Image (tube, rainbow, N blue to C red):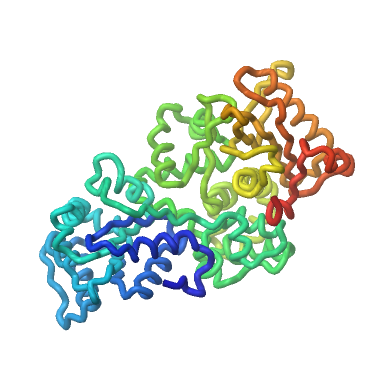
Amino acid sequence: MHKPSDMFDRDFEWSELVRFAAYPGREATLGVVSGRRRQGKTFLLDALCRETGGFYFSATEATEAESLRQFGSALARHTGQPIPYRFAHWEEAVETLMAIPVPDGRPMPVVIDEFPFLAKVSPELPSLLQRALGPNARRGGAPIRLLLCGSALSFMGNLLTGTAPLRGRASLELVVPTLDYRLAARFWDIEDPTLAMLVNAVVGGTPAYAREFTLGDAPADLEDFGPWVQRNVLNPGRPLFREARFLLSEEPGLRDTALYHGVLSAIADGNHTRGGIASYLARKSTDLGHALSVLEDTGMIVRDPDAFHGKRSAYRIAEPIVSFYHAVMRPEWSDLERPGHAGEVWARSQATFLSKVVGPHFEQVCRAWTRWYASPETLGGHRIRVQTGTVPDPAAKNGLEVDVAVFGRDDHGRETLLAIGEAKWKARMGRAHLARLERIRELLAARDGIDATHTRLLCFSGDGFTDDLHTAATDNNPDLQLVDLERLYNGS
């Protein structure tokens, strides 16, 4: 099965779907596909069905009776029946589906997209599928390759866990992620790394934002970036304008949306600890446990453990468009809703955009580069994890933040600190930044349990480095690595 020529990347996802669909066993099998909306899940699954002659059904928000009628009509069209199936209940529909005739007895993909819509009004559906996929039922059925797909991450994540009916039944559990920053630049066809970083800080790597949501409108150059934001993101006539709000409302488990928006606004404003978020919202820290857990489960936020303090952690927003909305748009919403004010809002939001949106996003991209693209020669060994952290400085009576902390293992299997790094988006890095990293390394080397003997120093900058720092980072000094935007996007 050939991947469609108009499908960008997704080689891994396509190969896994093909492997699942082509499994030659005579029994029915189950696969689960999830991921945030607009990542191309439907495109992938529809292409698989077209390539194999499989059955594709996309559920809608409807009553059980409506859904059964829609499913019966779609199944009849697929099987060539002149009259739609009239199912009284899902038990009958599932039995008919699992016995569907397949050409020449070959395995056939059956996709039920937006499965959470069906399960919401028919909660018994997972149990019915469990029974249909059981050992006794599978022997007499067809070699169906059933794929359940959904964008509600919390629901799809729980479909195969704990005591869920379908736990242990799936032979494929595929998450379709957003494109990372390098792939996103290619997808947007942006070669200038500065422009690519700015666009990525606003819309991330969601494929639909580059096509359907903007109709292919990409900024022509750096000068066009501001106008592009105004005409596509701050424009109340364009879908990106309300996208961040819709992403939150689409999650079925989020009921008190005001609280969740408040938590996201607190994080976007620079409050990354539970205590900081609670203070921002004028609430007790203990009151936020459920909200933070739900936002984590839905993939809205990520909790990053502190690399140097096991009991501390920091929260960050996982989706750039959500960060941009809460940092830039939400405080100016009344003005933005009135057409013609985007230019004024954008002009007075520049400081906020650079400090609250681009700066944190640049740090995260630097960690992503270190984790996935930096070579062992650059880091001084093979990395096993990359985190952030805070190191207390008793002499200065403060804490020094470490934007990038890279851990590996030595020849004896013991964990070692390969490198620490500092990331500055709009600051020309020089000797002062290097001295700060050296001080952090000195403090870490003095602590028990951390091997910082050969820890390298990484300087990440979106604005370049001073001449004396370049001189310090000669080929004879691999302990100091300078990483600019060109290296982030094209080097290792």
Expressed as whole percent of the image width and height from the top left, the position of residue 283 reads: 45, 30
In the picture as drawn, the residue positioned furthest to the front comes out as 411
For image coordinates 27% across by 46% down, the residue present is 168
Task: Please tell me whether residue 187 is drawn above or below residue 353 in the rendered image.
Answer: below
Name the foreground residue: 197 vs 447: 447
For image coordinates 25% across by 58% down, the residue present is 118
Expressed as whole percent of the image width and height from the top left, the position of residue 442 reads: 73, 23
Name the foreground residue: 120 vs 113: 113
Name the foreground residue: 389 vs 219: 389
Task: Please tell me whether residue 396 is drawn above or below residue 47 in the rendered image.
Answer: above
In the picture as drawn, the residue positioned furthest to the bottom comes out as 82
Task: Please tell me whether residue 207 is drawn above or below residue 304 in the rendered image.
Answer: below
Residue 124 in sight here: no
Expressed as whole percent of the image width and height from the top left, the position of residue 2 reads: 45, 73
Quarter of the figure with residue 133 = bottom left
From the viewer's perspective, tell me whether residue 244 is left or right of residue 55: right
Expressed as whole percent of the image width and height from the top left, the position of residue 475 reads: 83, 43
